């Protein structure tokens, strides 16, 4: 197993970058509107408080993802508040559950939006699509918990990490280098419709075209609970590897079903499809043996990472009764990017929504920490191009460990939307 590089002076951690960007402590006036003191404000700043929001799934199919992601968001801003806040303000994180329902998300957004400066989390591609026009028309800094390249190109909408197609290209490159797949091989890609599954499928199709492989395209509906048809398609096609871009229960169903029929080929999946609770299901043993996860940030308490260790310690102290997932790290690190943008906006004297968006797009490259290096200056490009490959290990918090440190396939540079 590869160990992770530690934070050095040459590679600033996500935990440290905001401290370097803090350049002001003066507040605007009490009203939160207009211009007072040295810092201009508009929405979400009032009295001693700066308010951001997390609109997430805490009761639907992505509940484990959304809940722990929100906890990661909270841990970051708790730390900032303990260190004096942002621009002299305490940061309040308003969390709302949409249960993976679009209408619930729209209703909650309508309630939250008039009182928040930014969204540190908006989970779900359908939810983002439903709210995108409002976000853009009001220039609300919004960090979407999606890695779909379909959301690139919007200044107020930020994707932290690496887009789905790049992750898939990187993951399949790793399988090729291991000799699992080669020219003429078949890849079965089981995916959801929409911006997650179909966007990830683009990565498989591009890789296959470049390398002379065949993709067996298998769609599964979000509400599906019986995966026997998809499993049979994979078995009949005699695929050499499987990619799953679906919900965690769907990953368990595909892995368990193919194992039962003797198709024990490697399975590559992405962050939204994995949760440590899967290891307690009937498919747990097969998942541990066959599945690897490709994504753009480090898992819980990753070996050799000072940042991951610090987040893990804060989580166990703040949420002693809860079990962490990989999304604690993602939530913390994403919030730290928003924190860096808020710091830069404060330093520029413009803590309005548009001021924060402008500050985000002018940040220098954020290098190191939980994510691979990221650059947000071009809204039309993925902030990162690198991925890590994770192995399943049920003995570890979060159930994952780093098998291969951040890397990038040479094909990533050739991929175009």
Image (cartoon, rainbow, N blue to C red):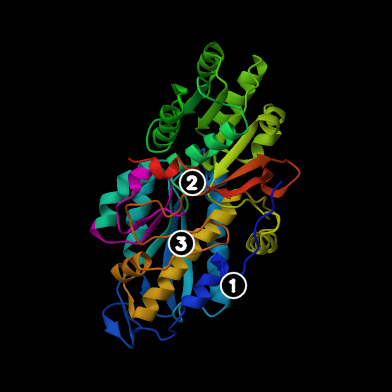
Instruction: Decide which of tag 1 and tag 3 comes sooner along the chain.
Output: 1
The 10 Å Cα crowd at callout 2, few under 14, some 14 to 19, many 20 or more, is: many
Q: Are marks 1 and 2 in contact (CB under 8 Å)?
A: no
Residue located at (49% from left, 26% from top)? 190
Looking at the rendered image, the disc whose residue lies closer to the viewer, 1 or 2, is 1
| Front residue of 232 and 203 | 203
Locate residue 26, reporting x and y percent: 41, 86
- Identify the secondary structure beneath mark 2: loop
Q: Mark 3 points at which residue?
A: 94
From mark 1 to mark 3, how far is it between C-alphas? 34 Å
The one nearer the camera, 97 or 292, is: 292
Task: Name the residue tied to disc 2.
Answer: 57
Q: Nearer the viewer, mark 1 or mark 3?
A: 1
Q: Which residue lies furthest to the top in this view?
A: 236
Q: Tag 3: Cα neighbours inside 10 Å, few (<14), some, or many (≥20)?
A: some
- Decide if residue 86 is on the left or right side of residue 321: left
At which x and y percent is residue 104?
Answer: 38, 45
Q: Nearer the viewer, residue 16 or 257?
A: 16
Q: Relative to residue 350, is residue 304 drawn left or right? A: right
Task: Provide the residue span drawn in magenta.
Answer: 137-160
The residue to which callout 1 is attached is 9
């Amino acid at each position: 197993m590869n160990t992770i590089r530690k934070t050095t002076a040459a590679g600033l951690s996500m935990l440290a970058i905001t401290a370097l960007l803090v350049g002001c402590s003066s507040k605007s006036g009490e009203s939160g509107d207009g211009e007072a003191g040295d810092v201009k404000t508009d929405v979400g700043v009032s009295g001693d408080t700066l308010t951001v929001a997390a609109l997430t799934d805490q009761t639907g199919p992505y509940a484990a993802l959304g809940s722990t992601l929100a906890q990661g968001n909270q841990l970051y801003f708790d730390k900032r508040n303990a260190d004096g806040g942002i621009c002299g303000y305490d940061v309040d994180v308003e969390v709302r559950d949409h249960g993976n329902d679009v209408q619930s998300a729209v209703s909650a957004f309508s309630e939250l939006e008039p009182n928040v400066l930014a969204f540190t989390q908006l989970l779900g591609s359908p939810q983002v699509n439903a709210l995108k026009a409002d976000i853009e028309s009001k220039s609300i800094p919004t960090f979407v918990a999606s890695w779909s390249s379909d959301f690139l190109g919007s200044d107020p909408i930020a994707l932290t990490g690496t887009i789905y197609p790049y992750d898939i290209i990187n993951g399949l490159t790793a399988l090729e280098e291991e000799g699992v797949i080669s020219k003429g091989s078949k890849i079965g890609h089981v995916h959801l419709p929409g911006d997650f599954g179909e966007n990830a499928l683009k990565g498989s199709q591009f890789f296959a075209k470049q390398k002379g492989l065949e993709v067996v395209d298998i769609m599964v509906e979000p509400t599906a609970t019986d995966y026997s048809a998809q499993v049979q398609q994979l078995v009949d096609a005699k695929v050499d590897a499987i990619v799953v871009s679906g919900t965690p229960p769907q990953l368990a169903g595909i892995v368990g079903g193919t194992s039962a029929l003797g198709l024990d080929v490697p399975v590559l999946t992405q962050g939204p499809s994995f949760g440590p609770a899967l290891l307690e299901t009937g498919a747990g043993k097969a998942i541990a043996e066959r599945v690897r996860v490709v994504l753009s940030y480090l898992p819980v308490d990753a070996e050799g990472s000072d940042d991951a260790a610090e987040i893990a310690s804060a989580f166990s102290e703040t949420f002693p009764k809860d079990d962490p997932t990989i999304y604690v790290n993602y939530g913390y690190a994403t919030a730290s990017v928003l924190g860096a943008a808020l710091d830069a906006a404060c330093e520029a004297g413009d803590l309005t929504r548009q001021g924060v968006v402008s500050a985000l797009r002018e940040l220098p490259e954020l290098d190191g920490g939980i994510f691979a290096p990221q650059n947000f200056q071009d809204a039309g490009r993925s902030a990162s191009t690198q991925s890590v490959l994770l192995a399943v290990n049920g003995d570890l918090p979060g159930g994952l460990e780093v098998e291969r440190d951040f890397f990038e396939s040479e094909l990533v540079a050739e991929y175009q939307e």
